[in-house]
Image (cartoon, coloured by chain):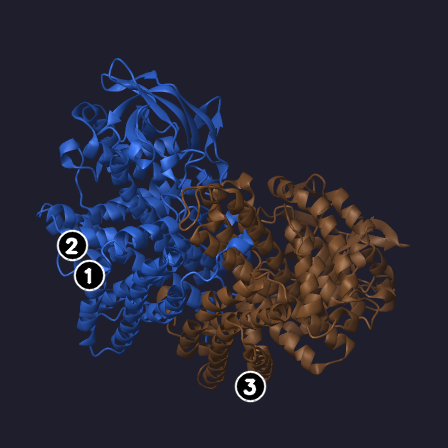
Chain colours: A blue, B brown
Amino acid sequence: MYRVPTDDYAFLLSEYFERDVVAHATDGDLTAGDAVAVIAAAGEFAVEVLHPLNAVGDRVGAALSDGVVTSPPGYVDAYRRYAEGGWAGTFLPKDIGGEGVPWTVHGALSELWSASNAALSLCAGLSIAAALALNAAADDEIRDTYLAPIVAGRWTATMNLTEPQAGTDLASITTVARPQADGTWAVTGQKIFITWGDHDLAENIVHLVLARTPDAPAGLAGLSLFVVPKYLPDDGVPGSRNSITTVSIEHKLGIHSSPTCVLQYDAAVGRLVGELNGGLAAMFVMMNASRIGIGVQALGVADRAFQQARDYAAQRVQGTVVGRAPGTPIAQHPDVARLLISMSSRISAFRALSMQLAVWLDAAQQDDSTQARELAEFLVPIFKGWVTEEAVAITSDAVQVHGGVGFIEETGTAQHYRDARIFPIYEGTTAIQSNDLVGRKMLRDRGRTAEQFFALIEKDVVELRASSDAVAARTVERLDRALAAARRATTALVEHAASNPRNVFAVSVPYLTLCGLLAGGWAHARLLAAQLRRADTDDRRVIEADFYGVHQLSRVHGLLEIIEAGEVAVGEKLA
Amino acid sequence: MYRVPTDDYAFLLSEYFERDVVAHATDGDLTAGDAVAVIAAAGEFAVEVLHPLNAVGDRVGAALSDGVVTSPPGYVDAYRRYAEGGWAGTFLPKDIGGEGVPWTVHGALSELWSASNAALSLCAGLSIAAALALNAAADDEIRDTYLAPIVAGRWTATMNLTEPQAGTDLASITTVARPQADGTWAVTGQKIFITWGDHDLAENIVHLVLARTPDAPAGLAGLSLFVVPKYLPDDGVPGSRNSITTVSIEHKLGIHSSPTCVLQYDAAVGRLVGELNGGLAAMFVMMNASRIGIGVQALGVADRAFQQARDYAAQRVQGTVVGRAPGTPIAQHPDVARLLISMSSRISAFRALSMQLAVWLDAAQQDDSTQARELAEFLVPIFKGWVTEEAVAITSDAVQVHGGVGFIEETGTAQHYRDARIFPIYEGTTAIQSNDLVGRKMLRDRGRTAEQFFALIEKDVVELRASSDAVAARTVERLDRALAAARRATTALVEHAASNPRNVFAVSVPYLTLCGLLAGGWAHARLLAAQLRRADTDDRRVIEADFYGVHQLSRVHGLLEIIEAGEVAVGEKLA
């Protein structure tokens, strides 16, 4: 059974940060206490409605027949209940009919949807991201037509970027949009990898499509964004069918219930969103939210996999456990215990970082804080890249804890392992995240934001240094060393950039990993500090902080060696 | 297309070691040149017959219907051709009708079978291991009855250890064998996870079953080994059906064409193999060969996954490659190049270690060398544990190189990722390997064999130190430091053992990993030395050695920190 991490969120929202971050972000409309109540209610829905469909969704999968995509049994009803419960609009602004909860609450809810049903959560997450993009960039007519039904969960939305020749390289997009006499655009082209591109959960599907107008400049500067609905809206309800065909759906390693479509647009009727040739900027709103969303999704699935492994290990008796009484479950085997705490300590770090990111995003909006915005932009690729890679490792650890039965599909842990493998790929691979981190967030200001980030960590280390606790002392020492390594790594990258850019991009993923490990160490230092402020004897957070310091932070020194070396091989020999 | 690593084997067998190891092991019957010819012939068979069935085997899988297991299309014919080609008996001794090739040749062939069809290779490998066990322990009557058809590939064999309550803990086995008046035994019980436990590839299936006789002592000391055939042999051919039922086959994450059976024995007719209550010792012959086999299997699948990723990256053009002309394929992207060489450099290390292990096993047999036997026994768990864990990582890297299409099943790379996940589990999980390494191979002689191993490495480092090559100098420096870390780690474990055994087993997997990384570094130092002896300009081995030193050997220092810390958490909080 999935146990909702409500207590962890309560701790994060009310003890981890120096103030009630929910109250601050909402001008007192909501408190951390209110947020926890919302999280608990969402948790109930996730456990009762979404979670039971996860396995059947994997087994049956989405199906395409006669051009129509059907979702697995139970999905239509579950999505209807999701919409009726008002969850589709929770995070969307009040002025378009949403509830306008802050990022902190949204982040927590996203974790629950993903942990209970990662494939279905994609449909929800993409619709939210699309609504944000439309709200930010579209004209009133489009906003009036499309936002209300998305907020209500009656319509869903998709993101159409990829084409067979244009994956990572969006400049190669060839889908064309031709102006029509009535002010609409005729969109023609093929888009692939369209998540929830067709399905039967909603009355209508709103596609946001990157395309090129006939006279547009080449490359990224010539992309415009169009809204192209499955059914043309007619007085607020879906009218005639637009000329969009679902050519096929992919047979994938995981997230089987999420239909991944090849969509063919044949002069489909679309409307321009925002400025002509301003498509990338408009899409970036959506991409940024989606990248955070995938990091949170990875956190959710990792936690679900961990919980299943922990529950199995807690009841499975096998052999004698060293230093323990006969009949002790395998959870107490030193190596199983190592795997379990290795998983849980990383997950705790992910969740704290997710909330930190949310707090910065809220502050960027609420206080118009440049520092918060810069720090959030710096952390997004780290969070997406590092958490998704680690989620793959954690779901693999969960299989390992199960031993032979972990390899049997009916156990259910293999599904998490399969599902998780897409996280470091979609919404930008880890290499893309690391290019963004190093190229755009780090080198562009020659490490200024990076140093802002390191200085924040240093401040917390100083605070922890005052503690007399033994684990605190060890944590300070480890974090000090890791921080020194991170600064040296940053200097090395700046120097690489001056001498040979290939050296930068050959070690940008190791640099991203180093930053992720450091960020996790920072999170644990603060979790530890918050826990030590408590007078209770629950030492899970203390053990996790200590374990993370030994088993994860210790990795940064090897990574520094890699980063300082730059590109070792030109790679020609191997290709 | 799968490219057979014949050239790498030629290099290993004739240049890597200081003498022709094949000639030495066979008293000159075969030379390294002969061995390469055998490997090339096997490679042709693997590419033409086994490899084309790998994807269909995954897609269709083995099926159970009315108690009968059917293999995927093409498998019956492929196995018949494997038998007719004489491959089943290649490694088996000449005195029982085999060809008696040495371990070096067997190791190479095993890699090819696994790379081309991992699931099918299990059937072949288990049959060989069973024949070795029977040959070593069984009486003449059993040997006369069973060995010839296994050597000829007409019958296959299985290994029956696991029961629902007895996985890692064989002491809990409850299957019982009751003596019959005619000298046979009536075997009753349920065995699970029986690989190729039933199928249609062979005329008969020979089950080796661990069971307990009625008056046997409790625990491991009361286990006896029985041979229990699917059909009772009648004058050399399969006669009446024995009472063994295939209850079910598992629905697994990978290796779909390998039927994993639940077998029910109902007073099935069996014969005792070897001594009463000596079952575990007899089975250990089989287990040891099987553990090496799984390490080699992991090498094969890792190489296959690497090759596919390399081939994809060599033709896929996407975006501009930094420092390269437009239209350069993604293989030249610094991060893709990093992933590819990261994979290939580990694979080269695995293959060299596989041959080292084979050379020691041959020497233990041929020269009756105690040192070779001890070193082989020390390396087996390292090889099995480290290579299988890394194979999972490498197949994951292969998916990553493909980006989004890697997640699509039709691409084929996802199959390797799914197949590989069982390698660190079956034939003893990585934790079991690390217990074996630390408990039996390391602590028992207080690090004497470990030190023998380290001294060998040191000797090669000294030789490389004489080189004027820059990569050689860097390699020496890195290996020196890694060696110092390994010695400190060994001392730490000896000290942990004296103070608290839980500290030992909480870090035994990190110790195994450290030893694996070091062994790989040793392999690369010798590959580099052998390459530098050549006058050609092919620098793949030089680049791989350099890359491995930076990206892999650098990890040992973080692992040392973990090993010295011992158990951080008791784990009670999490269970």
Q: Residue furthest left?
A: A27
Instruction: Please tell me whether residue A67 is drawn above or below residue B397 in the rendered image.
Output: above
Q: Residue at x 57, y 60 (%)?
A: B540
Residue A573, position as x, y percentages in the image: 55, 55
Q: Nearer the viewer, residue B358 or B457?
A: B457
Q: Earlier in the sequence, mark 1 or mark 2?
A: 2
Give the SS element for disc 1.
Answer: helix
The residue type indicated by label 3 comes to: Arg
Give the SS element for disc 3.
Answer: loop
The residue at which mark 2 appears reads as A371
Q: CA distance from mark 3 to mark 1?
A: 50 Å
Q: CA distance from mark 1 to mark 2?
A: 9 Å
Which mark is nearer the camera, 3 or 1? 1
Residue A65, position as x, y percentages in the image: 49, 24
The residue type indicated by label 1 comes to: Gln
Instruction: Please tell me whether residue B214 is drawn above or below residue A38 in the rendered image.
Output: below
Read off the chain for label 3: B
The residue at which mark 1 appears reads as A452
Q: Are marks 3 and 1 on the same chain?
A: no
Instruction: Please tell me whether residue A196 is drawn above or below residue A33 in the rendered image.
Output: above
Instruction: Please tell me whether residue B256 is drawn above or below residue A235 in the rendered image.
Output: below
The residue at which mark 3 appears reads as B446
Badge 3 crowding class, 10 Å Cα cut-off, few under 14, some 14 to 19, many 20 or more, is some
Tell me whether the residue at label 1 lies in contact with that at label 2, contact meaning CB atoms closer than 8 angstroms: yes
Read off the chain for label 1: A
The residue type indicated by label 2 comes to: Gln
Give the SS element for disc 2.
Answer: helix
Badge 2 crowding class, 10 Å Cα cut-off, few under 14, some 14 to 19, many 20 or more, is some
